[in-house]
Image (tube, grey):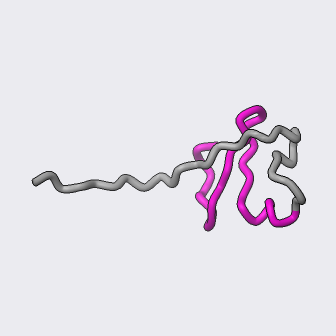
Amino acid sequence: MADQKPETGVTYKCVQCGAIITSDQFSLLLEIKCPNCGYRVLRKVRPPIVKRVKAV
């Protein structure tokens, strides 16, 4: 699953089954839950961007 291209918008991952859900799919559902297994605990996936801060 790490080989997938990141989509635009916010993506979430189901804690139980590991399914990737986009924020667009939540607009179709009446409640926040995984469309595959129905579990209600989701984790926000971080984008693969490394932020570097210059130390002074």
Query: In which quadrant of the rendered view does residue 49 lie?
Result: bottom left
Total count of labels: 0
Query: In which quadrant of the rendered view does residue 54 lie?
Result: bottom left
Where residue 34 appears, as percent x and y from the top left, is: 82, 46
Q: Is residue 16 left or right of residue 3?
A: right
Q: Residue at x 76, y 32 (%)?
A: 16
Q: Assign the magenta stretch its main secondary structure.
A: loop
Where residue 6 appears, as percent x and y from the top left, is: 59, 58
Location of the C terminus by quadrant is bottom left
Where residue 11 appears, as percent x and y from the top left, is: 65, 55
Where residue 13 appears, as percent x and y from the top left, is: 69, 44
Task: Say if the magenta span includes residue 31.
Answer: no
Task: Say if the magenta span includes residue 10.
Answer: yes
Residue lying furthest top:
16
The span picked out in magenta is: 1-28
Q: Is residue 49 left or right of residue 28?
A: left
Q: Residue at x 60, y 57 (%)?
A: 5
Q: Is residue 1 left or right of residue 40?
A: left
Residue lying furthest front:
31
Q: Is residue 32 above or below residue 1?
A: below
Q: Residue at x 62, y 52 (%)?
A: 4
Q: Nearer the viewer, residue 4 or 42?
A: 42
Q: Is residue 39 left or right of residue 14?
A: right
Q: Is residue 5 above or below residue 8?
A: above
